[in-house]
Amino acid sequence: MRRENTVNSAYGVIPARITRSRAAVNQATGSVLPPKPSVKNNLNTLKRTANDENAQAYCPKVNRAKRRAVLGDLSNFCGVGLKRTGNTEPKKIPKSQAGRPSGREFSRVRPTKTDQKVHVAQNATEAATSAEEDGCDTREKESASLMGFVMGQCSQESCIDSADENKAPEELQRCSPKREFIDLDRDHKNPQMCTVYAVDIYLNLRAAELLRRPDCDFMETRQRDITQGMRAILVDWLVEVSEEYKLVPDTLYLTVSIIDRFLSDNFIERQKLQLLGITSMLIASKYEEICAPRVEELCIMTDNTYTRNDVLRMESEVLSHLNFHLSVPTVKTFLRRFLRAAQASYELPVNAQAPSLSLEFLANYLAELTLVDYAFLRFLPSLIAAAAVFLARWTLDESSPPWTPTLEHYTRYRFSDLKAAALELQELQVNAKNSPLHAIRQKYSQIKFKSVAAVTPRSSLPALFR
């Protein structure tokens, strides 16, 4: 410590910087003023008392930034059913600013149903226009249109808010038709169900299934050395591989999706088709599985037709083409949601688990049959999942209606929208016995799947759509 920074007093040496004002006071009074506490010297004290409950009592007054005020009402948040806290009185606008709109003032009046529909229509039109100006492809335009359509449907089917409370009961029944469906997202206590975000998640998935969708005619336009039968044999073999390594169903669906997306834009020879299959399964396993199969194990499954370097080279080529966009909605993605809607409206007998499990296994069996058939690429994954649930309900119980308001609400498909997909799916189910590709049929003939592959199809389905 320097000499000039100390002051001798009756209490010993006090560290302090002697300024001009302090020296003047010392000369006038002949005494020594106590030094000001130094913030720099108290930093260690602050660190030691950081965990103390009374730490604020020892903190010196340092220039702190002002705390930001809590945000008030926002115009892009519709708080239906939420209680407001605090002062809810509208802010008084000065007379000088009464005629001028301000960007910082937000309206507290909730928009009406008509305003919401107009706003949704304007957003859909702007999204489609911006897509055309940016030169995006047809899939992005369809995705923008679908998102606008889905959001429009949501605004029309939303619950009655507090703005309509003053209407008479007869007017409410006329302006908002009653839809008797079961709410699947009412269990807010279970955090694993993500009930708060479930609706938004599936709205985004409905739009995303259009963006990264394989072409439905790549065999005719792009490929010249492989056929639809070769693709079916490859998928049937991949089902056996997934059963050998006990992979989750999402891995199988993602594998087929990667194969079709790659074949949609790249020509491949028939000698490399199996290489593409095991490489796609390796990529899907890394994305979905906890422990993915090793490259050497997949090479052994092909009788060492391909080497490790061949698989790694093909993996780099596939990922570069896909630009690492692996998160795509598949049939299995929508099947989980639609099965919950189907089981919620299913009248169960005393043994409640038996019909629900049979419904789930049969719907999964029908959905996996579509992986082998190249013709089902022209249907959206959500439509295939809805048709599988519809056909499974009709196959198990012909007496009850196979399509309920709950299924129509959550799938957003009407009964008439399922006709083409359901009829082709039933034809695929009938011909599964005589097909030489039997991997999926043998898989679902096991007892753990309740042998749903042996269930006799209904012959009265075409008459249902008349």
Image (spheres, rainbow, N blue to C red):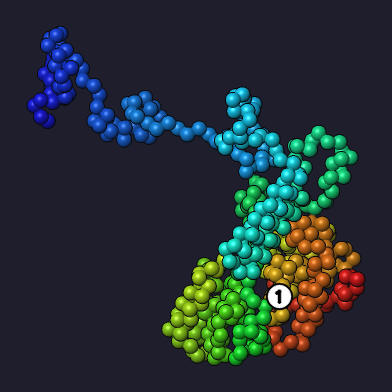
Residue 96 place in picture, x, y as percent: 59, 25
Question: Is residue 109 visible to the viewer in this orientation of the structure?
Answer: yes
Where the N terminus falls, by quadrant? top left
- Residue, far left: 3
The image quadrant that residue 243 belongs to is bottom right
Residue found 37% across the figure and 24% down from its top: 57
Which residue matches tag 1?
378
**Figure disc tally:** 1
Q: Is residue 95 left or right of residue 412?
A: left
The type of residue carrying mark 1 is Arg
Residue 351 place in picture, x, y as percent: 80, 61
Judging depth in this view, the residue of 356 and 122 nearest the camera is 122
Residue found 71% across the figure and 75% down from its top: 378
Residue found 77% across the figure and 63% down from its top: 413
Q: Looking at the picture, does residue 122 appear above or below residue 79?
A: below
Q: Is residue 142 left or right of residue 412?
A: left
